[in-house]
Image (cartoon, rainbow, N blue to C red):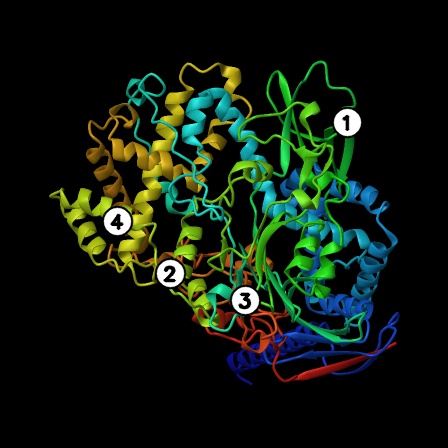
Amino acid sequence: MDPMKKTLRILGWLVAALLTLIVVAALGLYFVLRASLPPLDGDLKLAGLKGPVTLTRDARGIVGIEAMDDLDAVRALGYVHAQERFFEMDMARRSAAGELSEILGSATLGMDKDKRRHRMRARLTDLWAKAAPAEKSLVGTYAEGVNAGLQSLGTRPWQYQVLRTTPQPWREIDTLLVGAEMTFMLQGRGIDDRLAEIGLRNMAGDALFAWLKPGGGEWDAALDGSAVANAPLPTARDLDTRAQPEKKTDTAARGIADVETAPGSNNWAAGRAATADGRAILADDMHLGIGVPAIWLRTQITVTAPDGAKRRLAGVTLPGVQSLVVGSNGDVAWGFTNSYGQWFDVVAHPREPAPTGLVKVTETIQVKGAQAVDIEVREAPWGPVLASDKAHDYSVWWTLYREGSINTVSHDLRLARDVDEAVAIAQRSGIPHQNFVVADRAGNIAWTIMGRIPAKGDAPRPTSRGRAVTPDQLPDGWLAPAKYPLIMNPSNGRLWTANSRQTGGAHGALIGDGGFDLGARAMQIRDRMTEKPVLNEKDLYGIQLDAESRFMKRWVTLALRVSGAQSDDKSKALARELAKWNGRADTDQVGYRIARQFRAVVMERLWEAWVAAARRGAPAAATEVQSAARAIKLSHDGRFEYPVWQAISAQAPHLLPLPYKTWDAFLAAQLIDTHDELVKLAGSLEKATWGERNRARFKHPFSRAMPFLGRWLDMPATPQAGDNHLPRVAAPGFGASQRMVVAPGREEEGIFTMPGGQSGHPLSPYFGAGNQEFHEGAAAPLLAGPPQHTLRLAP
């Protein structure tokens, strides 16, 4: 045989063998992954059940649970959560406890060190030992269901096979840790900001601090109609930028348009006075970081109530927790927005001598593939030390550390028959503090705070932004529910919340200020609700999809005036696009993106200039609580809008950054920087649409570490309308985690959509289910459709 032919034949065999090996390996991987899919049909035994339970899935993957007993339904819910989302549950408990590195390695060590300072596993273990027997039975039943669901899989969940590790059983304390992780997500930033604000107040003084960090202003839409006046404009004696050395920072190049924090969640309700037939309608969309799969699991539970009647619950559950989070029980519907109250205090105490009771605790963090890491936690009797300067330690008192801050009372909402009962449950519930808006089938609506409110004796404890407290000022108990803020059945039949200041006066002081949003979003929701005398479900859903930006109009007007006065080509191009703006944050809009970037650059540069001017002459110790870099980030507070607009309107020369001689020159320069940044990012100004920047990036955790997996694990990068400071909140990895509109008793007319999908398994028919209709704004039904799969569980 010709040597060349022989060589080619051998190469052909080798290639064929290699391809065969690849195919076999791919098939092997496929079958291994497929083995970890949950069983969806058939008959199985579930130990601990008192009676039969039916589990169904419809075309969207909505889980249906039908049981004769509440604890059986809870056990079945744990079973389903483990089937569909055990890995995500594991990540939540580990994140709260500072234990991610045990299975993810050193990449998460920094996160674990930060969380481990709070020692949540140890704290919650101690607190859980004091829990009532009924609570332990409820959570224990759920945990048993979780472990049974995990064991029902043909093999360990696919994520653990990729990580080459084994999932650990679910324990009762882990459910509390999931609740703690939600508290970190919703309140943790407020603690970080409070530490920075203490440094800012020490440096700038009380008057200047009040101006730089206002508590409210003209964009507020408080439920009680209260208003907060602007602080006086600083005089040149208070703040003067002109004495600084000339410095021009290249802020636009740092992506300023992405820096402002976007607090999330909207909810509102129309009562009998605002609907044609006297029904009450609730709308709720909770804004969170969005990934794959969704944070929630759409669930419908039918269970026999103590009175013998069947009760249907429809809404979402949080994998890791045993109860419906938001939804309707047929008589009552409820929803949340984060309250952003001050549910923590920072205590300043001398480093030497240390306060009585301060101890040092060594925490050991296990790290996969590396040696364990020990960290030292210094802890006062009320909480850990989180920051220090030369003379002081700053420790934190937080409701999360206190007995009763996490409990199972919210589970009783499944049985609430009217607004009064639901409010009473909310005010005793131990969850991260929420604006609780509730409606009932009789047409009643109400707002209150859900979560335990700390108190000092029989009164609210004092709260103040930017100030540390002394140990004797700390709360020593919980406020009585009778003293909670409550608004029920307002005369116009409308309630709304959107993370901004809700009340003033005594109730406002009771809630405190843990980082409210600007209020423009709440104002637009309020105004949209009052534009029509009579509202229905479609009207409320339309508000959820409202991408008009009433807030940005004045910035467009300003940018048009400034750019129109210039003669250069860049300014003319900006003016042309701004003039074409349709007033909305739509995907095809260039003008909106220009105005948004312009505002962000102006705000950041004014913050830098004003903080630098305030820092001059301040004692060194006054700036040591947090670094200058951290202080700069305080401009992410949306309420910085107030002093910025006040200064621009006043054209105050002593507040103008150098080297500019006039405010118009400063603003024109920021517009040119905006132009150059957008052209750099998009290739040309005409291509710099809002949709080009605001594409959905709903990613799976694995694709963040291994981007090549994104093709199979991530949701499509869909351009999104919407933004912060308007009802339709949408950012690349943040936004509405669900949209729900429902009238109690009329759930068949309810609307519900959710991004990210139901299942965490890429081979599941429900992986990504519902994501596309969420982006399309489809009015999908709240209730489950006909079952596609039925699994029967028996004792």
Q: Amino acid at mark 4?
A: Val
Q: How many numbered discs sit on the rendered protein? A: 4
Q: CA distance from mark 2 to mark 4?
A: 16 Å
The residue positioned 71% from the left and 34% from the top of the image is 458
Between discs 4 and 3, the one toward the N terminus: 3
Rendered position, 163 above or below 187: below
Q: Is residue 776 visible?
A: yes
Amino acid at pointer 3 = Ala
Q: Are marks 2 and 1 in contact (CB under 8 Å)?
A: no
Query: Crowding at label 2, few (<14), some or many (≥20) Cα neighbours within 10 Å?
Result: many
Q: Nearer the viewer, residue 334 or 91?
A: 334
Task: Please tell me which residue lies in front, 443 or 709.
Answer: 443
Residue placed farthest to the left in the image? 567
Q: Of discs 4 and 3, which sits in the foreground? A: 3
In the image, taking residue 558 as reference, residue 184 lies left or right, namely: right
Residue 532 drawn at (x, y percent): 38, 65
Residue at image mark 2:
547
Residue found at x 13% / y 44%: 568
Residue 19: give x, y in percent of width and height.
Answer: 59, 77
Tell me whether the residue at label 4 lies in contact with that at label 3, contact meaning CB atoms closer than 8 angstroms: no
Identify residue for label 1.
360
Q: What amino acid is labelled 1 in the image?
A: Lys
Residue with the mark numbered 3: 280
Between discs 2 and 1, the one toward the N terminus = 1
- Chain-order first, disc 3 or disc 1: 3
Question: Marks 1/4: CA distance?
Answer: 55 Å
Q: Residue at x 55, y 56 (%)?
A: 704
Q: Residue 296, which numbered label?
A: none
Answer with mark 1 or mark 4, whichever residue precedes in sequence: 1
Q: Which residue is mark 4?
A: 556
Instruction: Name the side, left or right, on which 533 lies relative to 359.
Output: left
